[in-house]
Structure formats: C-alpha cells, structure tokens
Image: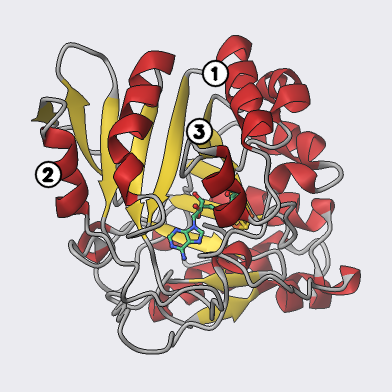
Amino acid sequence: MLNSHITHQLIDRFGRKVDYLRISITDRCDFRCVYCMSEEMTFLPREHVLSLEELYFIAQAFAELGVKKIRVTGGEPLVRRGALELLQNIGRIDSLHELVLTTNGSQLERMALPLKKTGVKRINISLDTLDAGKFKAITRTGDLQQVLRGIDAARNAGFERIKINSVILKDKNHLEVVSLLQFAVDKGIDISFIEEMPLGMVSQHDRSSSYYSSDCIKADLAAHFSLIASTEKTGGPSVYYKVQGTQIRVGFISPHSANFCGSCNRVRLTVEGQLLLCLGNEHSVDLKQVIRSYPGDMDILKQAIVDAMLIKPEKHEFNIHEQPVILRHMSVTGG
Ligand code: SAM
Ligand code: SF4
C-alpha cells in the first residue's frame, strides 16, 4: 500500500515538489548537433527502448502522483513512429494541465497540424542560427530552410505559444543573438538563450572556450532592444524579460552563471526507462525493470517513483573546464 500522505504528491528531501516530468521518447535524431551528439552515434537497440505503451503507463503513474506538466522530447521526438498517437494518449490524461513538446523543427512542415490536433498546446523549437552554412555546421545534417518552413507551419497551426531555443556558443553563433531575437520579434514568438551544458563527450569543440554567458548575451541584446525584467515565474530555469513595445518574452537559461536548483520541480525519464533525478548528476532509478518485472502493476510503479524522490540530489555542479562527469548526451537525457 502507498503511504496515504504522499500518494498524490512527489516531495523530495529538500521539500521541493516535483510536478513536472520530461520524457525522452527516442534517443534517435535526424540531426547531430555538435553540442549534443558525436558525429558517429550508436543508438539503443529496440529491446532496450520503452514501448509506446510502457511510456504511456509511466506517464499515467506520474499524473496520478500529482505531475501536472509533461514535456515530450528526445532525441528528436517527431522521428519516433507512433509519436503522435502517444502524445494524443498522454494529452487525454485528465489531471494533466500541460502537455508540451521540444523539437528540432525538421518534421513540422508536415506534422504541425496533426501535432496541434493531439492536444499539444505549446512547443519549443530549437534554432541556433539563421545562416544556412552555420546551421549545417552546428547540426551537421540539418537544413535551415526546412526548419524555417516548419516554424511557419507551427505558427499557422495556431499553437498557444511557440518558443525558440538557442544554444549560444562563442565563435560559432554568439554574433547572431541580436538577429535571432529580431527573428523572434518578427515572427511573434518567444525565445530562450541557453548556455551550453557539459553533457556527454563531444568531439568537435572545447566546451570551456565555447562558453558564452547569459550576461554577455544580455549585454549584446541591450545595445539593440530594451529588455524589461519580468516577474513571471514559470517554475523552470529560465529568467524572463519582455522586449519593450512587444509581447515577446526572452528567456535566459544559465546553468553555469545562475544555479537554478533551489526551485527544481522536475525529473526526467529516458527512453530506456531510467528515471533521472537531476540533469547534472547520475542519480537514477530503473523504472523499466520495475514495469517489466511487474507488468501492469500501477501501485508498485508508483511506489518506486515515490521512493526515488529520496535520492533526488540537492543541486548540480557543472564544470566546463573538466571532462564531463555526466557521460550521457543530452539526446539520451531528454533536453
Ligand atoms: N531534438 C529536439 C531539439 O533539438 O529541440 C529535442 C531534444 S534536444 C536534446 C533539446 C534541447 O536541448 C535543444 O534545444 C538543444 O539545443 C538542447 N541541448 C542539447 N545539448 C545541449 C547541451 N550540451 N547544452 C545545452 N543545451 C543542449
Ligand atoms: Fe538532435 Fe536535438 Fe540533439 Fe540536435 S539537440 S542532435 S536536434 S536531439
């Protein structure tokens, strides 16, 4: 039996309430972004990957434990066969307030409308540059025009909110922050600038020399836009500003320069069924083993999730000057 006072809430040892789950539904991707993957990747064999039914079952368990928001991510979530059906099923879970998606945009031209119909209300689309050559250099395989058409398709499909995510790397795209924000303003969508995190070994660049802080980005933007600090709290790591004279929000995600762990409300599920308690630590619980040992037993699964809260670490310690302690790539973690 589950302990009744914790049945409907997930609270960790530091009193933080966990009500947000990010699920990586595939480790595969059609891009090979330099900060996320190696050029040559070995992807998981099928039997190691949770089925769509298993993913849905775990999502249900979390919803019963008080999780209100689920983000589906990857790898590239929209390349997994059956992704739309899964999203539709998760979207129908009554107690869930928000189902959102992070995508690289490559499939949106044809999938934006069906995606909107699944009940996903808000999407994040990754875009680090508006220069086709640089886009190819950063994603290794991506086509900028395809993603730009995807962004327009998403705007036409009528999502409640679209946000661009831009990882900023010194000497790769840091000179583009002003044009990226201008792009967001022109398209009427939000944007967040992200400091690179040292997840997984990357071959192509040295992370300490590519570090470009949120403060530098803010200073670059301030020369062209008036940014007004917003008091809005989303419970996430982003600190938001409004661009004066517009409705556009600019977020800054600063894992190095501003530690956001004190208000952490989230955990992550990898497509292998590992429940990761912290982005920057290895603490995890194998939920695949639980559901494959006790198929269909919701109580046992929920108890395992409740127990997992006891090992959620207090905070991450990223150090870009050392080799990464966290060997999994963001594509496995579910960014
Ligand atoms: N494929 C989808 C996409 O690119 O939006 C979803 C998964 S991707 C791992 C999610 C987000 O993580 C993207 O915005 C990506 O730019 C970001 N990301 C990947 N590796 C990162 C790293 N090492 N540091 C910071 N952000 C990273
Ligand atoms: Fe793929 Fe997203 Fe990682 Fe780029 S950031 S390689 S698009 S999973």
Residue 192 at x, y percent in the picture: 34, 40
Mark 2 and mark 1: Cα distance apart in space: 31 Å
**Left of 152 or right of it: where is 181?**
left
Residue type at the position of mark 3 = Glu
Foreground residue among 235 and 213: 213
Q: In this rendering, which labeled residue sits more in front, label 2 or label 3?
A: 2
Mark 1 and mark 3: Cα distance apart in space: 13 Å
Residue 94 at x, y percent in the picture: 60, 31
> Could you tell me if residue 1 is visible in this image?
no
Residue 32 at x, y percent in the picture: 66, 60
Q: Which residue is at a point 53% across and 37% down the rendered structure image?
A: 125
Residue 188, placed above or below residue 215: above
Report the disc number at residue 217.
none
Residue ID for mark 1: 159
> Could you tell me if residue 108 is visible in this image?
yes
Residue 103 at x, y percent in the picture: 61, 41
Count neighbours of disc 2 (C-alpha within 10 A) and say few if under 14, some if 14 to 19, many if 20 or more. few
Residue ID for mark 2: 219
Residue ID for mark 3: 98
Mark 2 and mark 3: Cα distance apart in space: 33 Å
Count neighbours of disc 1 (C-alpha within 10 A) and say few if under 14, some if 14 to 19, many if 20 or more. some
Q: Are marks 1 and 3 in contact (CB under 8 Å)?
A: no
Q: Residue furthest front?
A: 133
> Upstream in the sequence, badge 2 or badge 1?
1
> Upstream in the sequence, badge 2 or badge 3?
3
> Upstream in the sequence, badge 1 or badge 3?
3
Q: Quadrant of residue 305?
A: bottom right
Q: What is the count of numbered marks?
A: 3
**Left of 155 or right of it: where is 3?**
left
Q: Secondary structure at mark 2?
A: helix
